[in-house]
């Protein structure tokens, strides 16, 4: 592994496949974007992405590194038990991977799992009514949203079946009293899902702070929103916004690509 000058990471570019390197760059970008939009919680949440190939190996953040510091090479490759399967100078938080390993094992389509403890997301997760259909963003999320009751810090293996059950085939999960979770076929898709979900929560908290009666979107509109959203995005999901987001990161700090 080649040492990157003036950094605490190694360059893995020449020692992994092109497919893995692309996955690393996109996942590192997702971490940087979460930090940029201020959804991070110091070092205490995770985004994971499956490495292309037949093995159920995944990339996750090195424990103790801020999201704004993560690079493609610093991501740690692990198995479903949280064991490192490739040389890395970094460790991970095994307990923090409980949620991610459960979903990756159960959902072949969930190539990326993004979990946040954003202030607005946790605020709405603590409300009995959950996410309300009061904005365009919220109805998009509600078209594919599950809820999972809080069972304490996610350390127990026996919570995994209930997590998988509550997510089902949905793309969004609200972890009661805890935070938000999205899944996607790519980091771009998981990020776009989180962007919309976080926006929906922020709008709800602000609308409630206004003190007036809230107008809820009618059920017939809710029932047809998923098809309408797919038409607007042309079925491309996060791919539409992702190139522009990468350009933004390149202007701010392109070191995520190292």
Image (spheres, helix red, strand yellow):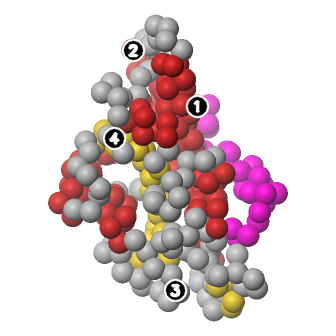
175 above or below 127? below
* Residue where numbered disc 1 is placed: 231
Q: In this view, does 195 lie to the left or right of 220?
A: right
Q: Does residue 255 show up magenta in the picture?
A: yes
Name the mark on residue 245. none
255 above or below 162? below
Main secondary structure of the magenta stretch: helix
Residue at the spot 49% in from the left edge and 32% down from the top edge:
201
Q: Is residue 109 left or right of residue 2?
A: left
How far apart in space, not on screen, are marks 4 and 3 (Cα)?
Answer: 34 Å
How far apart in space, not on screen, are marks 3 and 2 (Cα)?
Answer: 51 Å
Q: Residues within 10 Å of mark 1 (few under 14, many from 20)?
A: few
Q: Please state the horizontal and vertical placement of residue 187, each as a whole percent of the image.
A: 55, 56
Q: Residues within 10 Å of mark 2 (few under 14, many from 20)?
A: few
How far apart in space, not on screen, are marks 4 and 2 (Cα)?
Answer: 27 Å
Q: Nearer the viewer, mark 4 or mark 2?
A: 4
Name the mark on residue 219. 2
Q: Does residue 58 show up magenta in the picture?
A: no
Magenta residues span 231-257
Q: Nearer the viewer, mark 1 or mark 4?
A: 4
* Residue where numbered disc 4 is placed: 177
| Residue 171, quarter of the rendered image | top left
């Amino acid at each position: 592994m080649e040492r990157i000058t003036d950094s605490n990471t190694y360059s893995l570019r020449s020692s992994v496949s092109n497919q893995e390197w692309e996955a690393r760059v996109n996942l590192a970008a997702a971490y940087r974007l979460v930090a940029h939009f201020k959804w991070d919680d110091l070092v205490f949440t995770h985004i994971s992405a499956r490495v292309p190939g037949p093995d159920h190996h995944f990339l996750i953040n090195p424990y103790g590194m801020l999201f704004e510091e993560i690079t493609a090479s610093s991501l740690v490759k692990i198995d479903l038990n949280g064991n490192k399967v490739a040389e890395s100078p970094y460790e991970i938080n095994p307990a923090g991977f409980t949620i991610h390993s459960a979903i990756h094992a159960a959902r072949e389509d969930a190539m990326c799992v993004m979990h946040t403890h954003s202030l607005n997301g946790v605020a709405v997760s603590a409300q009995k009514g959950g996410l309300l259909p009061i904005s365009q963003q919220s109805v998009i999320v509600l078209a594919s949203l599950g809820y999972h009751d809080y069972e304490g810090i996610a350390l127990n293996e026996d919570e995994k079946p209930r997590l998988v059950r509550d997510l089902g085939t949905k793309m969004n999960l609200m972890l009661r009293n805890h935070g938000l979770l999205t899944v996607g076929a790519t980091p771009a898709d998981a990020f776009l899902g989180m962007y919309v979900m976080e926006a929906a929560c922020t709008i709800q908290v602000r609308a409630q702070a206004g003190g007036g009666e809230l107008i809820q979107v009618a059920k017939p509109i809710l029932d047809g929103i998923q098809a309408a959203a797919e038409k607007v995005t042309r079925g491309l999901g996060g791919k539409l916004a992702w190139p522009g987001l990468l350009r933004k990161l390149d202007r701010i700090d392109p070191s995520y690509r190292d």
